[in-house]
Amino acid sequence: MDWVETLIVVLHVVIAVALVGLVLIQQGKGADAGAAFGGGASQTVFGSQGSGNFLTRATTLLAIVFFVTSFSLAVFAKQRAEVAGEAGIPQVQQPAAEESPAPAGAGESAAGSSENESQGGDDNALPDLE
């Protein structure tokens, strides 16, 4: 693996874990009712508006970076698949262009035409692989 690709994979995993943590830390919409009964003092760490705005912006930023790393890893995988595909798939060889035989005359027998078919005159034959 290229060092840039390794860096992006590590960053991708760290961001995924951070996103899970940020989503789990955030309060639900029904948690505001608890603040009316004395639970509002725990929100003073993030300022007077609480942690909602800060955590929402941090989650949005991490989600954007997560999608960017996902897209870049997809581009790396596509490039790697193209290189592997070119190296491992055998190519079909086209038979050398042969002179077309002279049209069969009226004097040829049926045995002559069957002899021509056995010599490779079959158009449905499979081409040779490298």
Image (tube, helix red, strand yellow):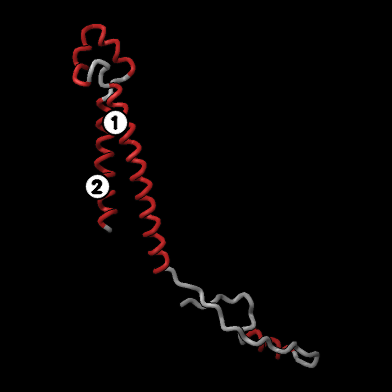
Dot 1 corresponds to which residue? 58
Counting from the top left corner in percent of width and height, residue 26 is at: 28, 24
Q: Is residue 67 above or below residue 94?
A: above
Left or right, residue 41 beside residue 5: left
Count neighbours of disc 1 (C-alpha within 10 A) and say few if under 14, some if 14 to 19, many if 20 or more. Answer: some
Left or right, residue 21 beside residue 75: left
Count all numbered tags in the image, as a single digit.
2
The amino acid type, in three-letter code, at marker 1 is Ala
Dot 2 or dot 1: first in sequence order is 2
The N terminus sits in image quarter: bottom left
Q: Is residue 20 above or below residue 51?
A: below
Q: Are marks 2 and 1 in contact (CB under 8 Å)?
A: no
Tell me which corner region of the image, top left, top right, bottom left or bottom right, holds residue 116: bottom right
Counting from the top left corner in percent of width and height, residue 103 is at: 75, 87
Tell me which corner region of the image, top left, top right, bottom left or bottom right, holds residue 101: bottom right
Q: Is residue 80 above or below residue 44?
A: below
The amino acid type, in three-letter code, at marker 2 is Val
Counting from the top left corner in percent of width and height, residue 112 is at: 70, 91
Counting from the top left corner in percent of width and height, residue 69 is at: 33, 45
Q: Residue at x 35, y 37 (%)?
A: 64
Q: Is residue 123 above or below residue 54?
A: below
Dot 2 corresponds to which residue? 10
Q: Residue at x 31, y 20 (%)?
A: 28
Q: Residue at x 27, y 33 (%)?
A: 20
Which residue appears farthest toward the front when viewing the image? 47
Left or right, residue 61 beside residue 78: left
Which residue appears farthest toward the bottom when viewing the image? 107
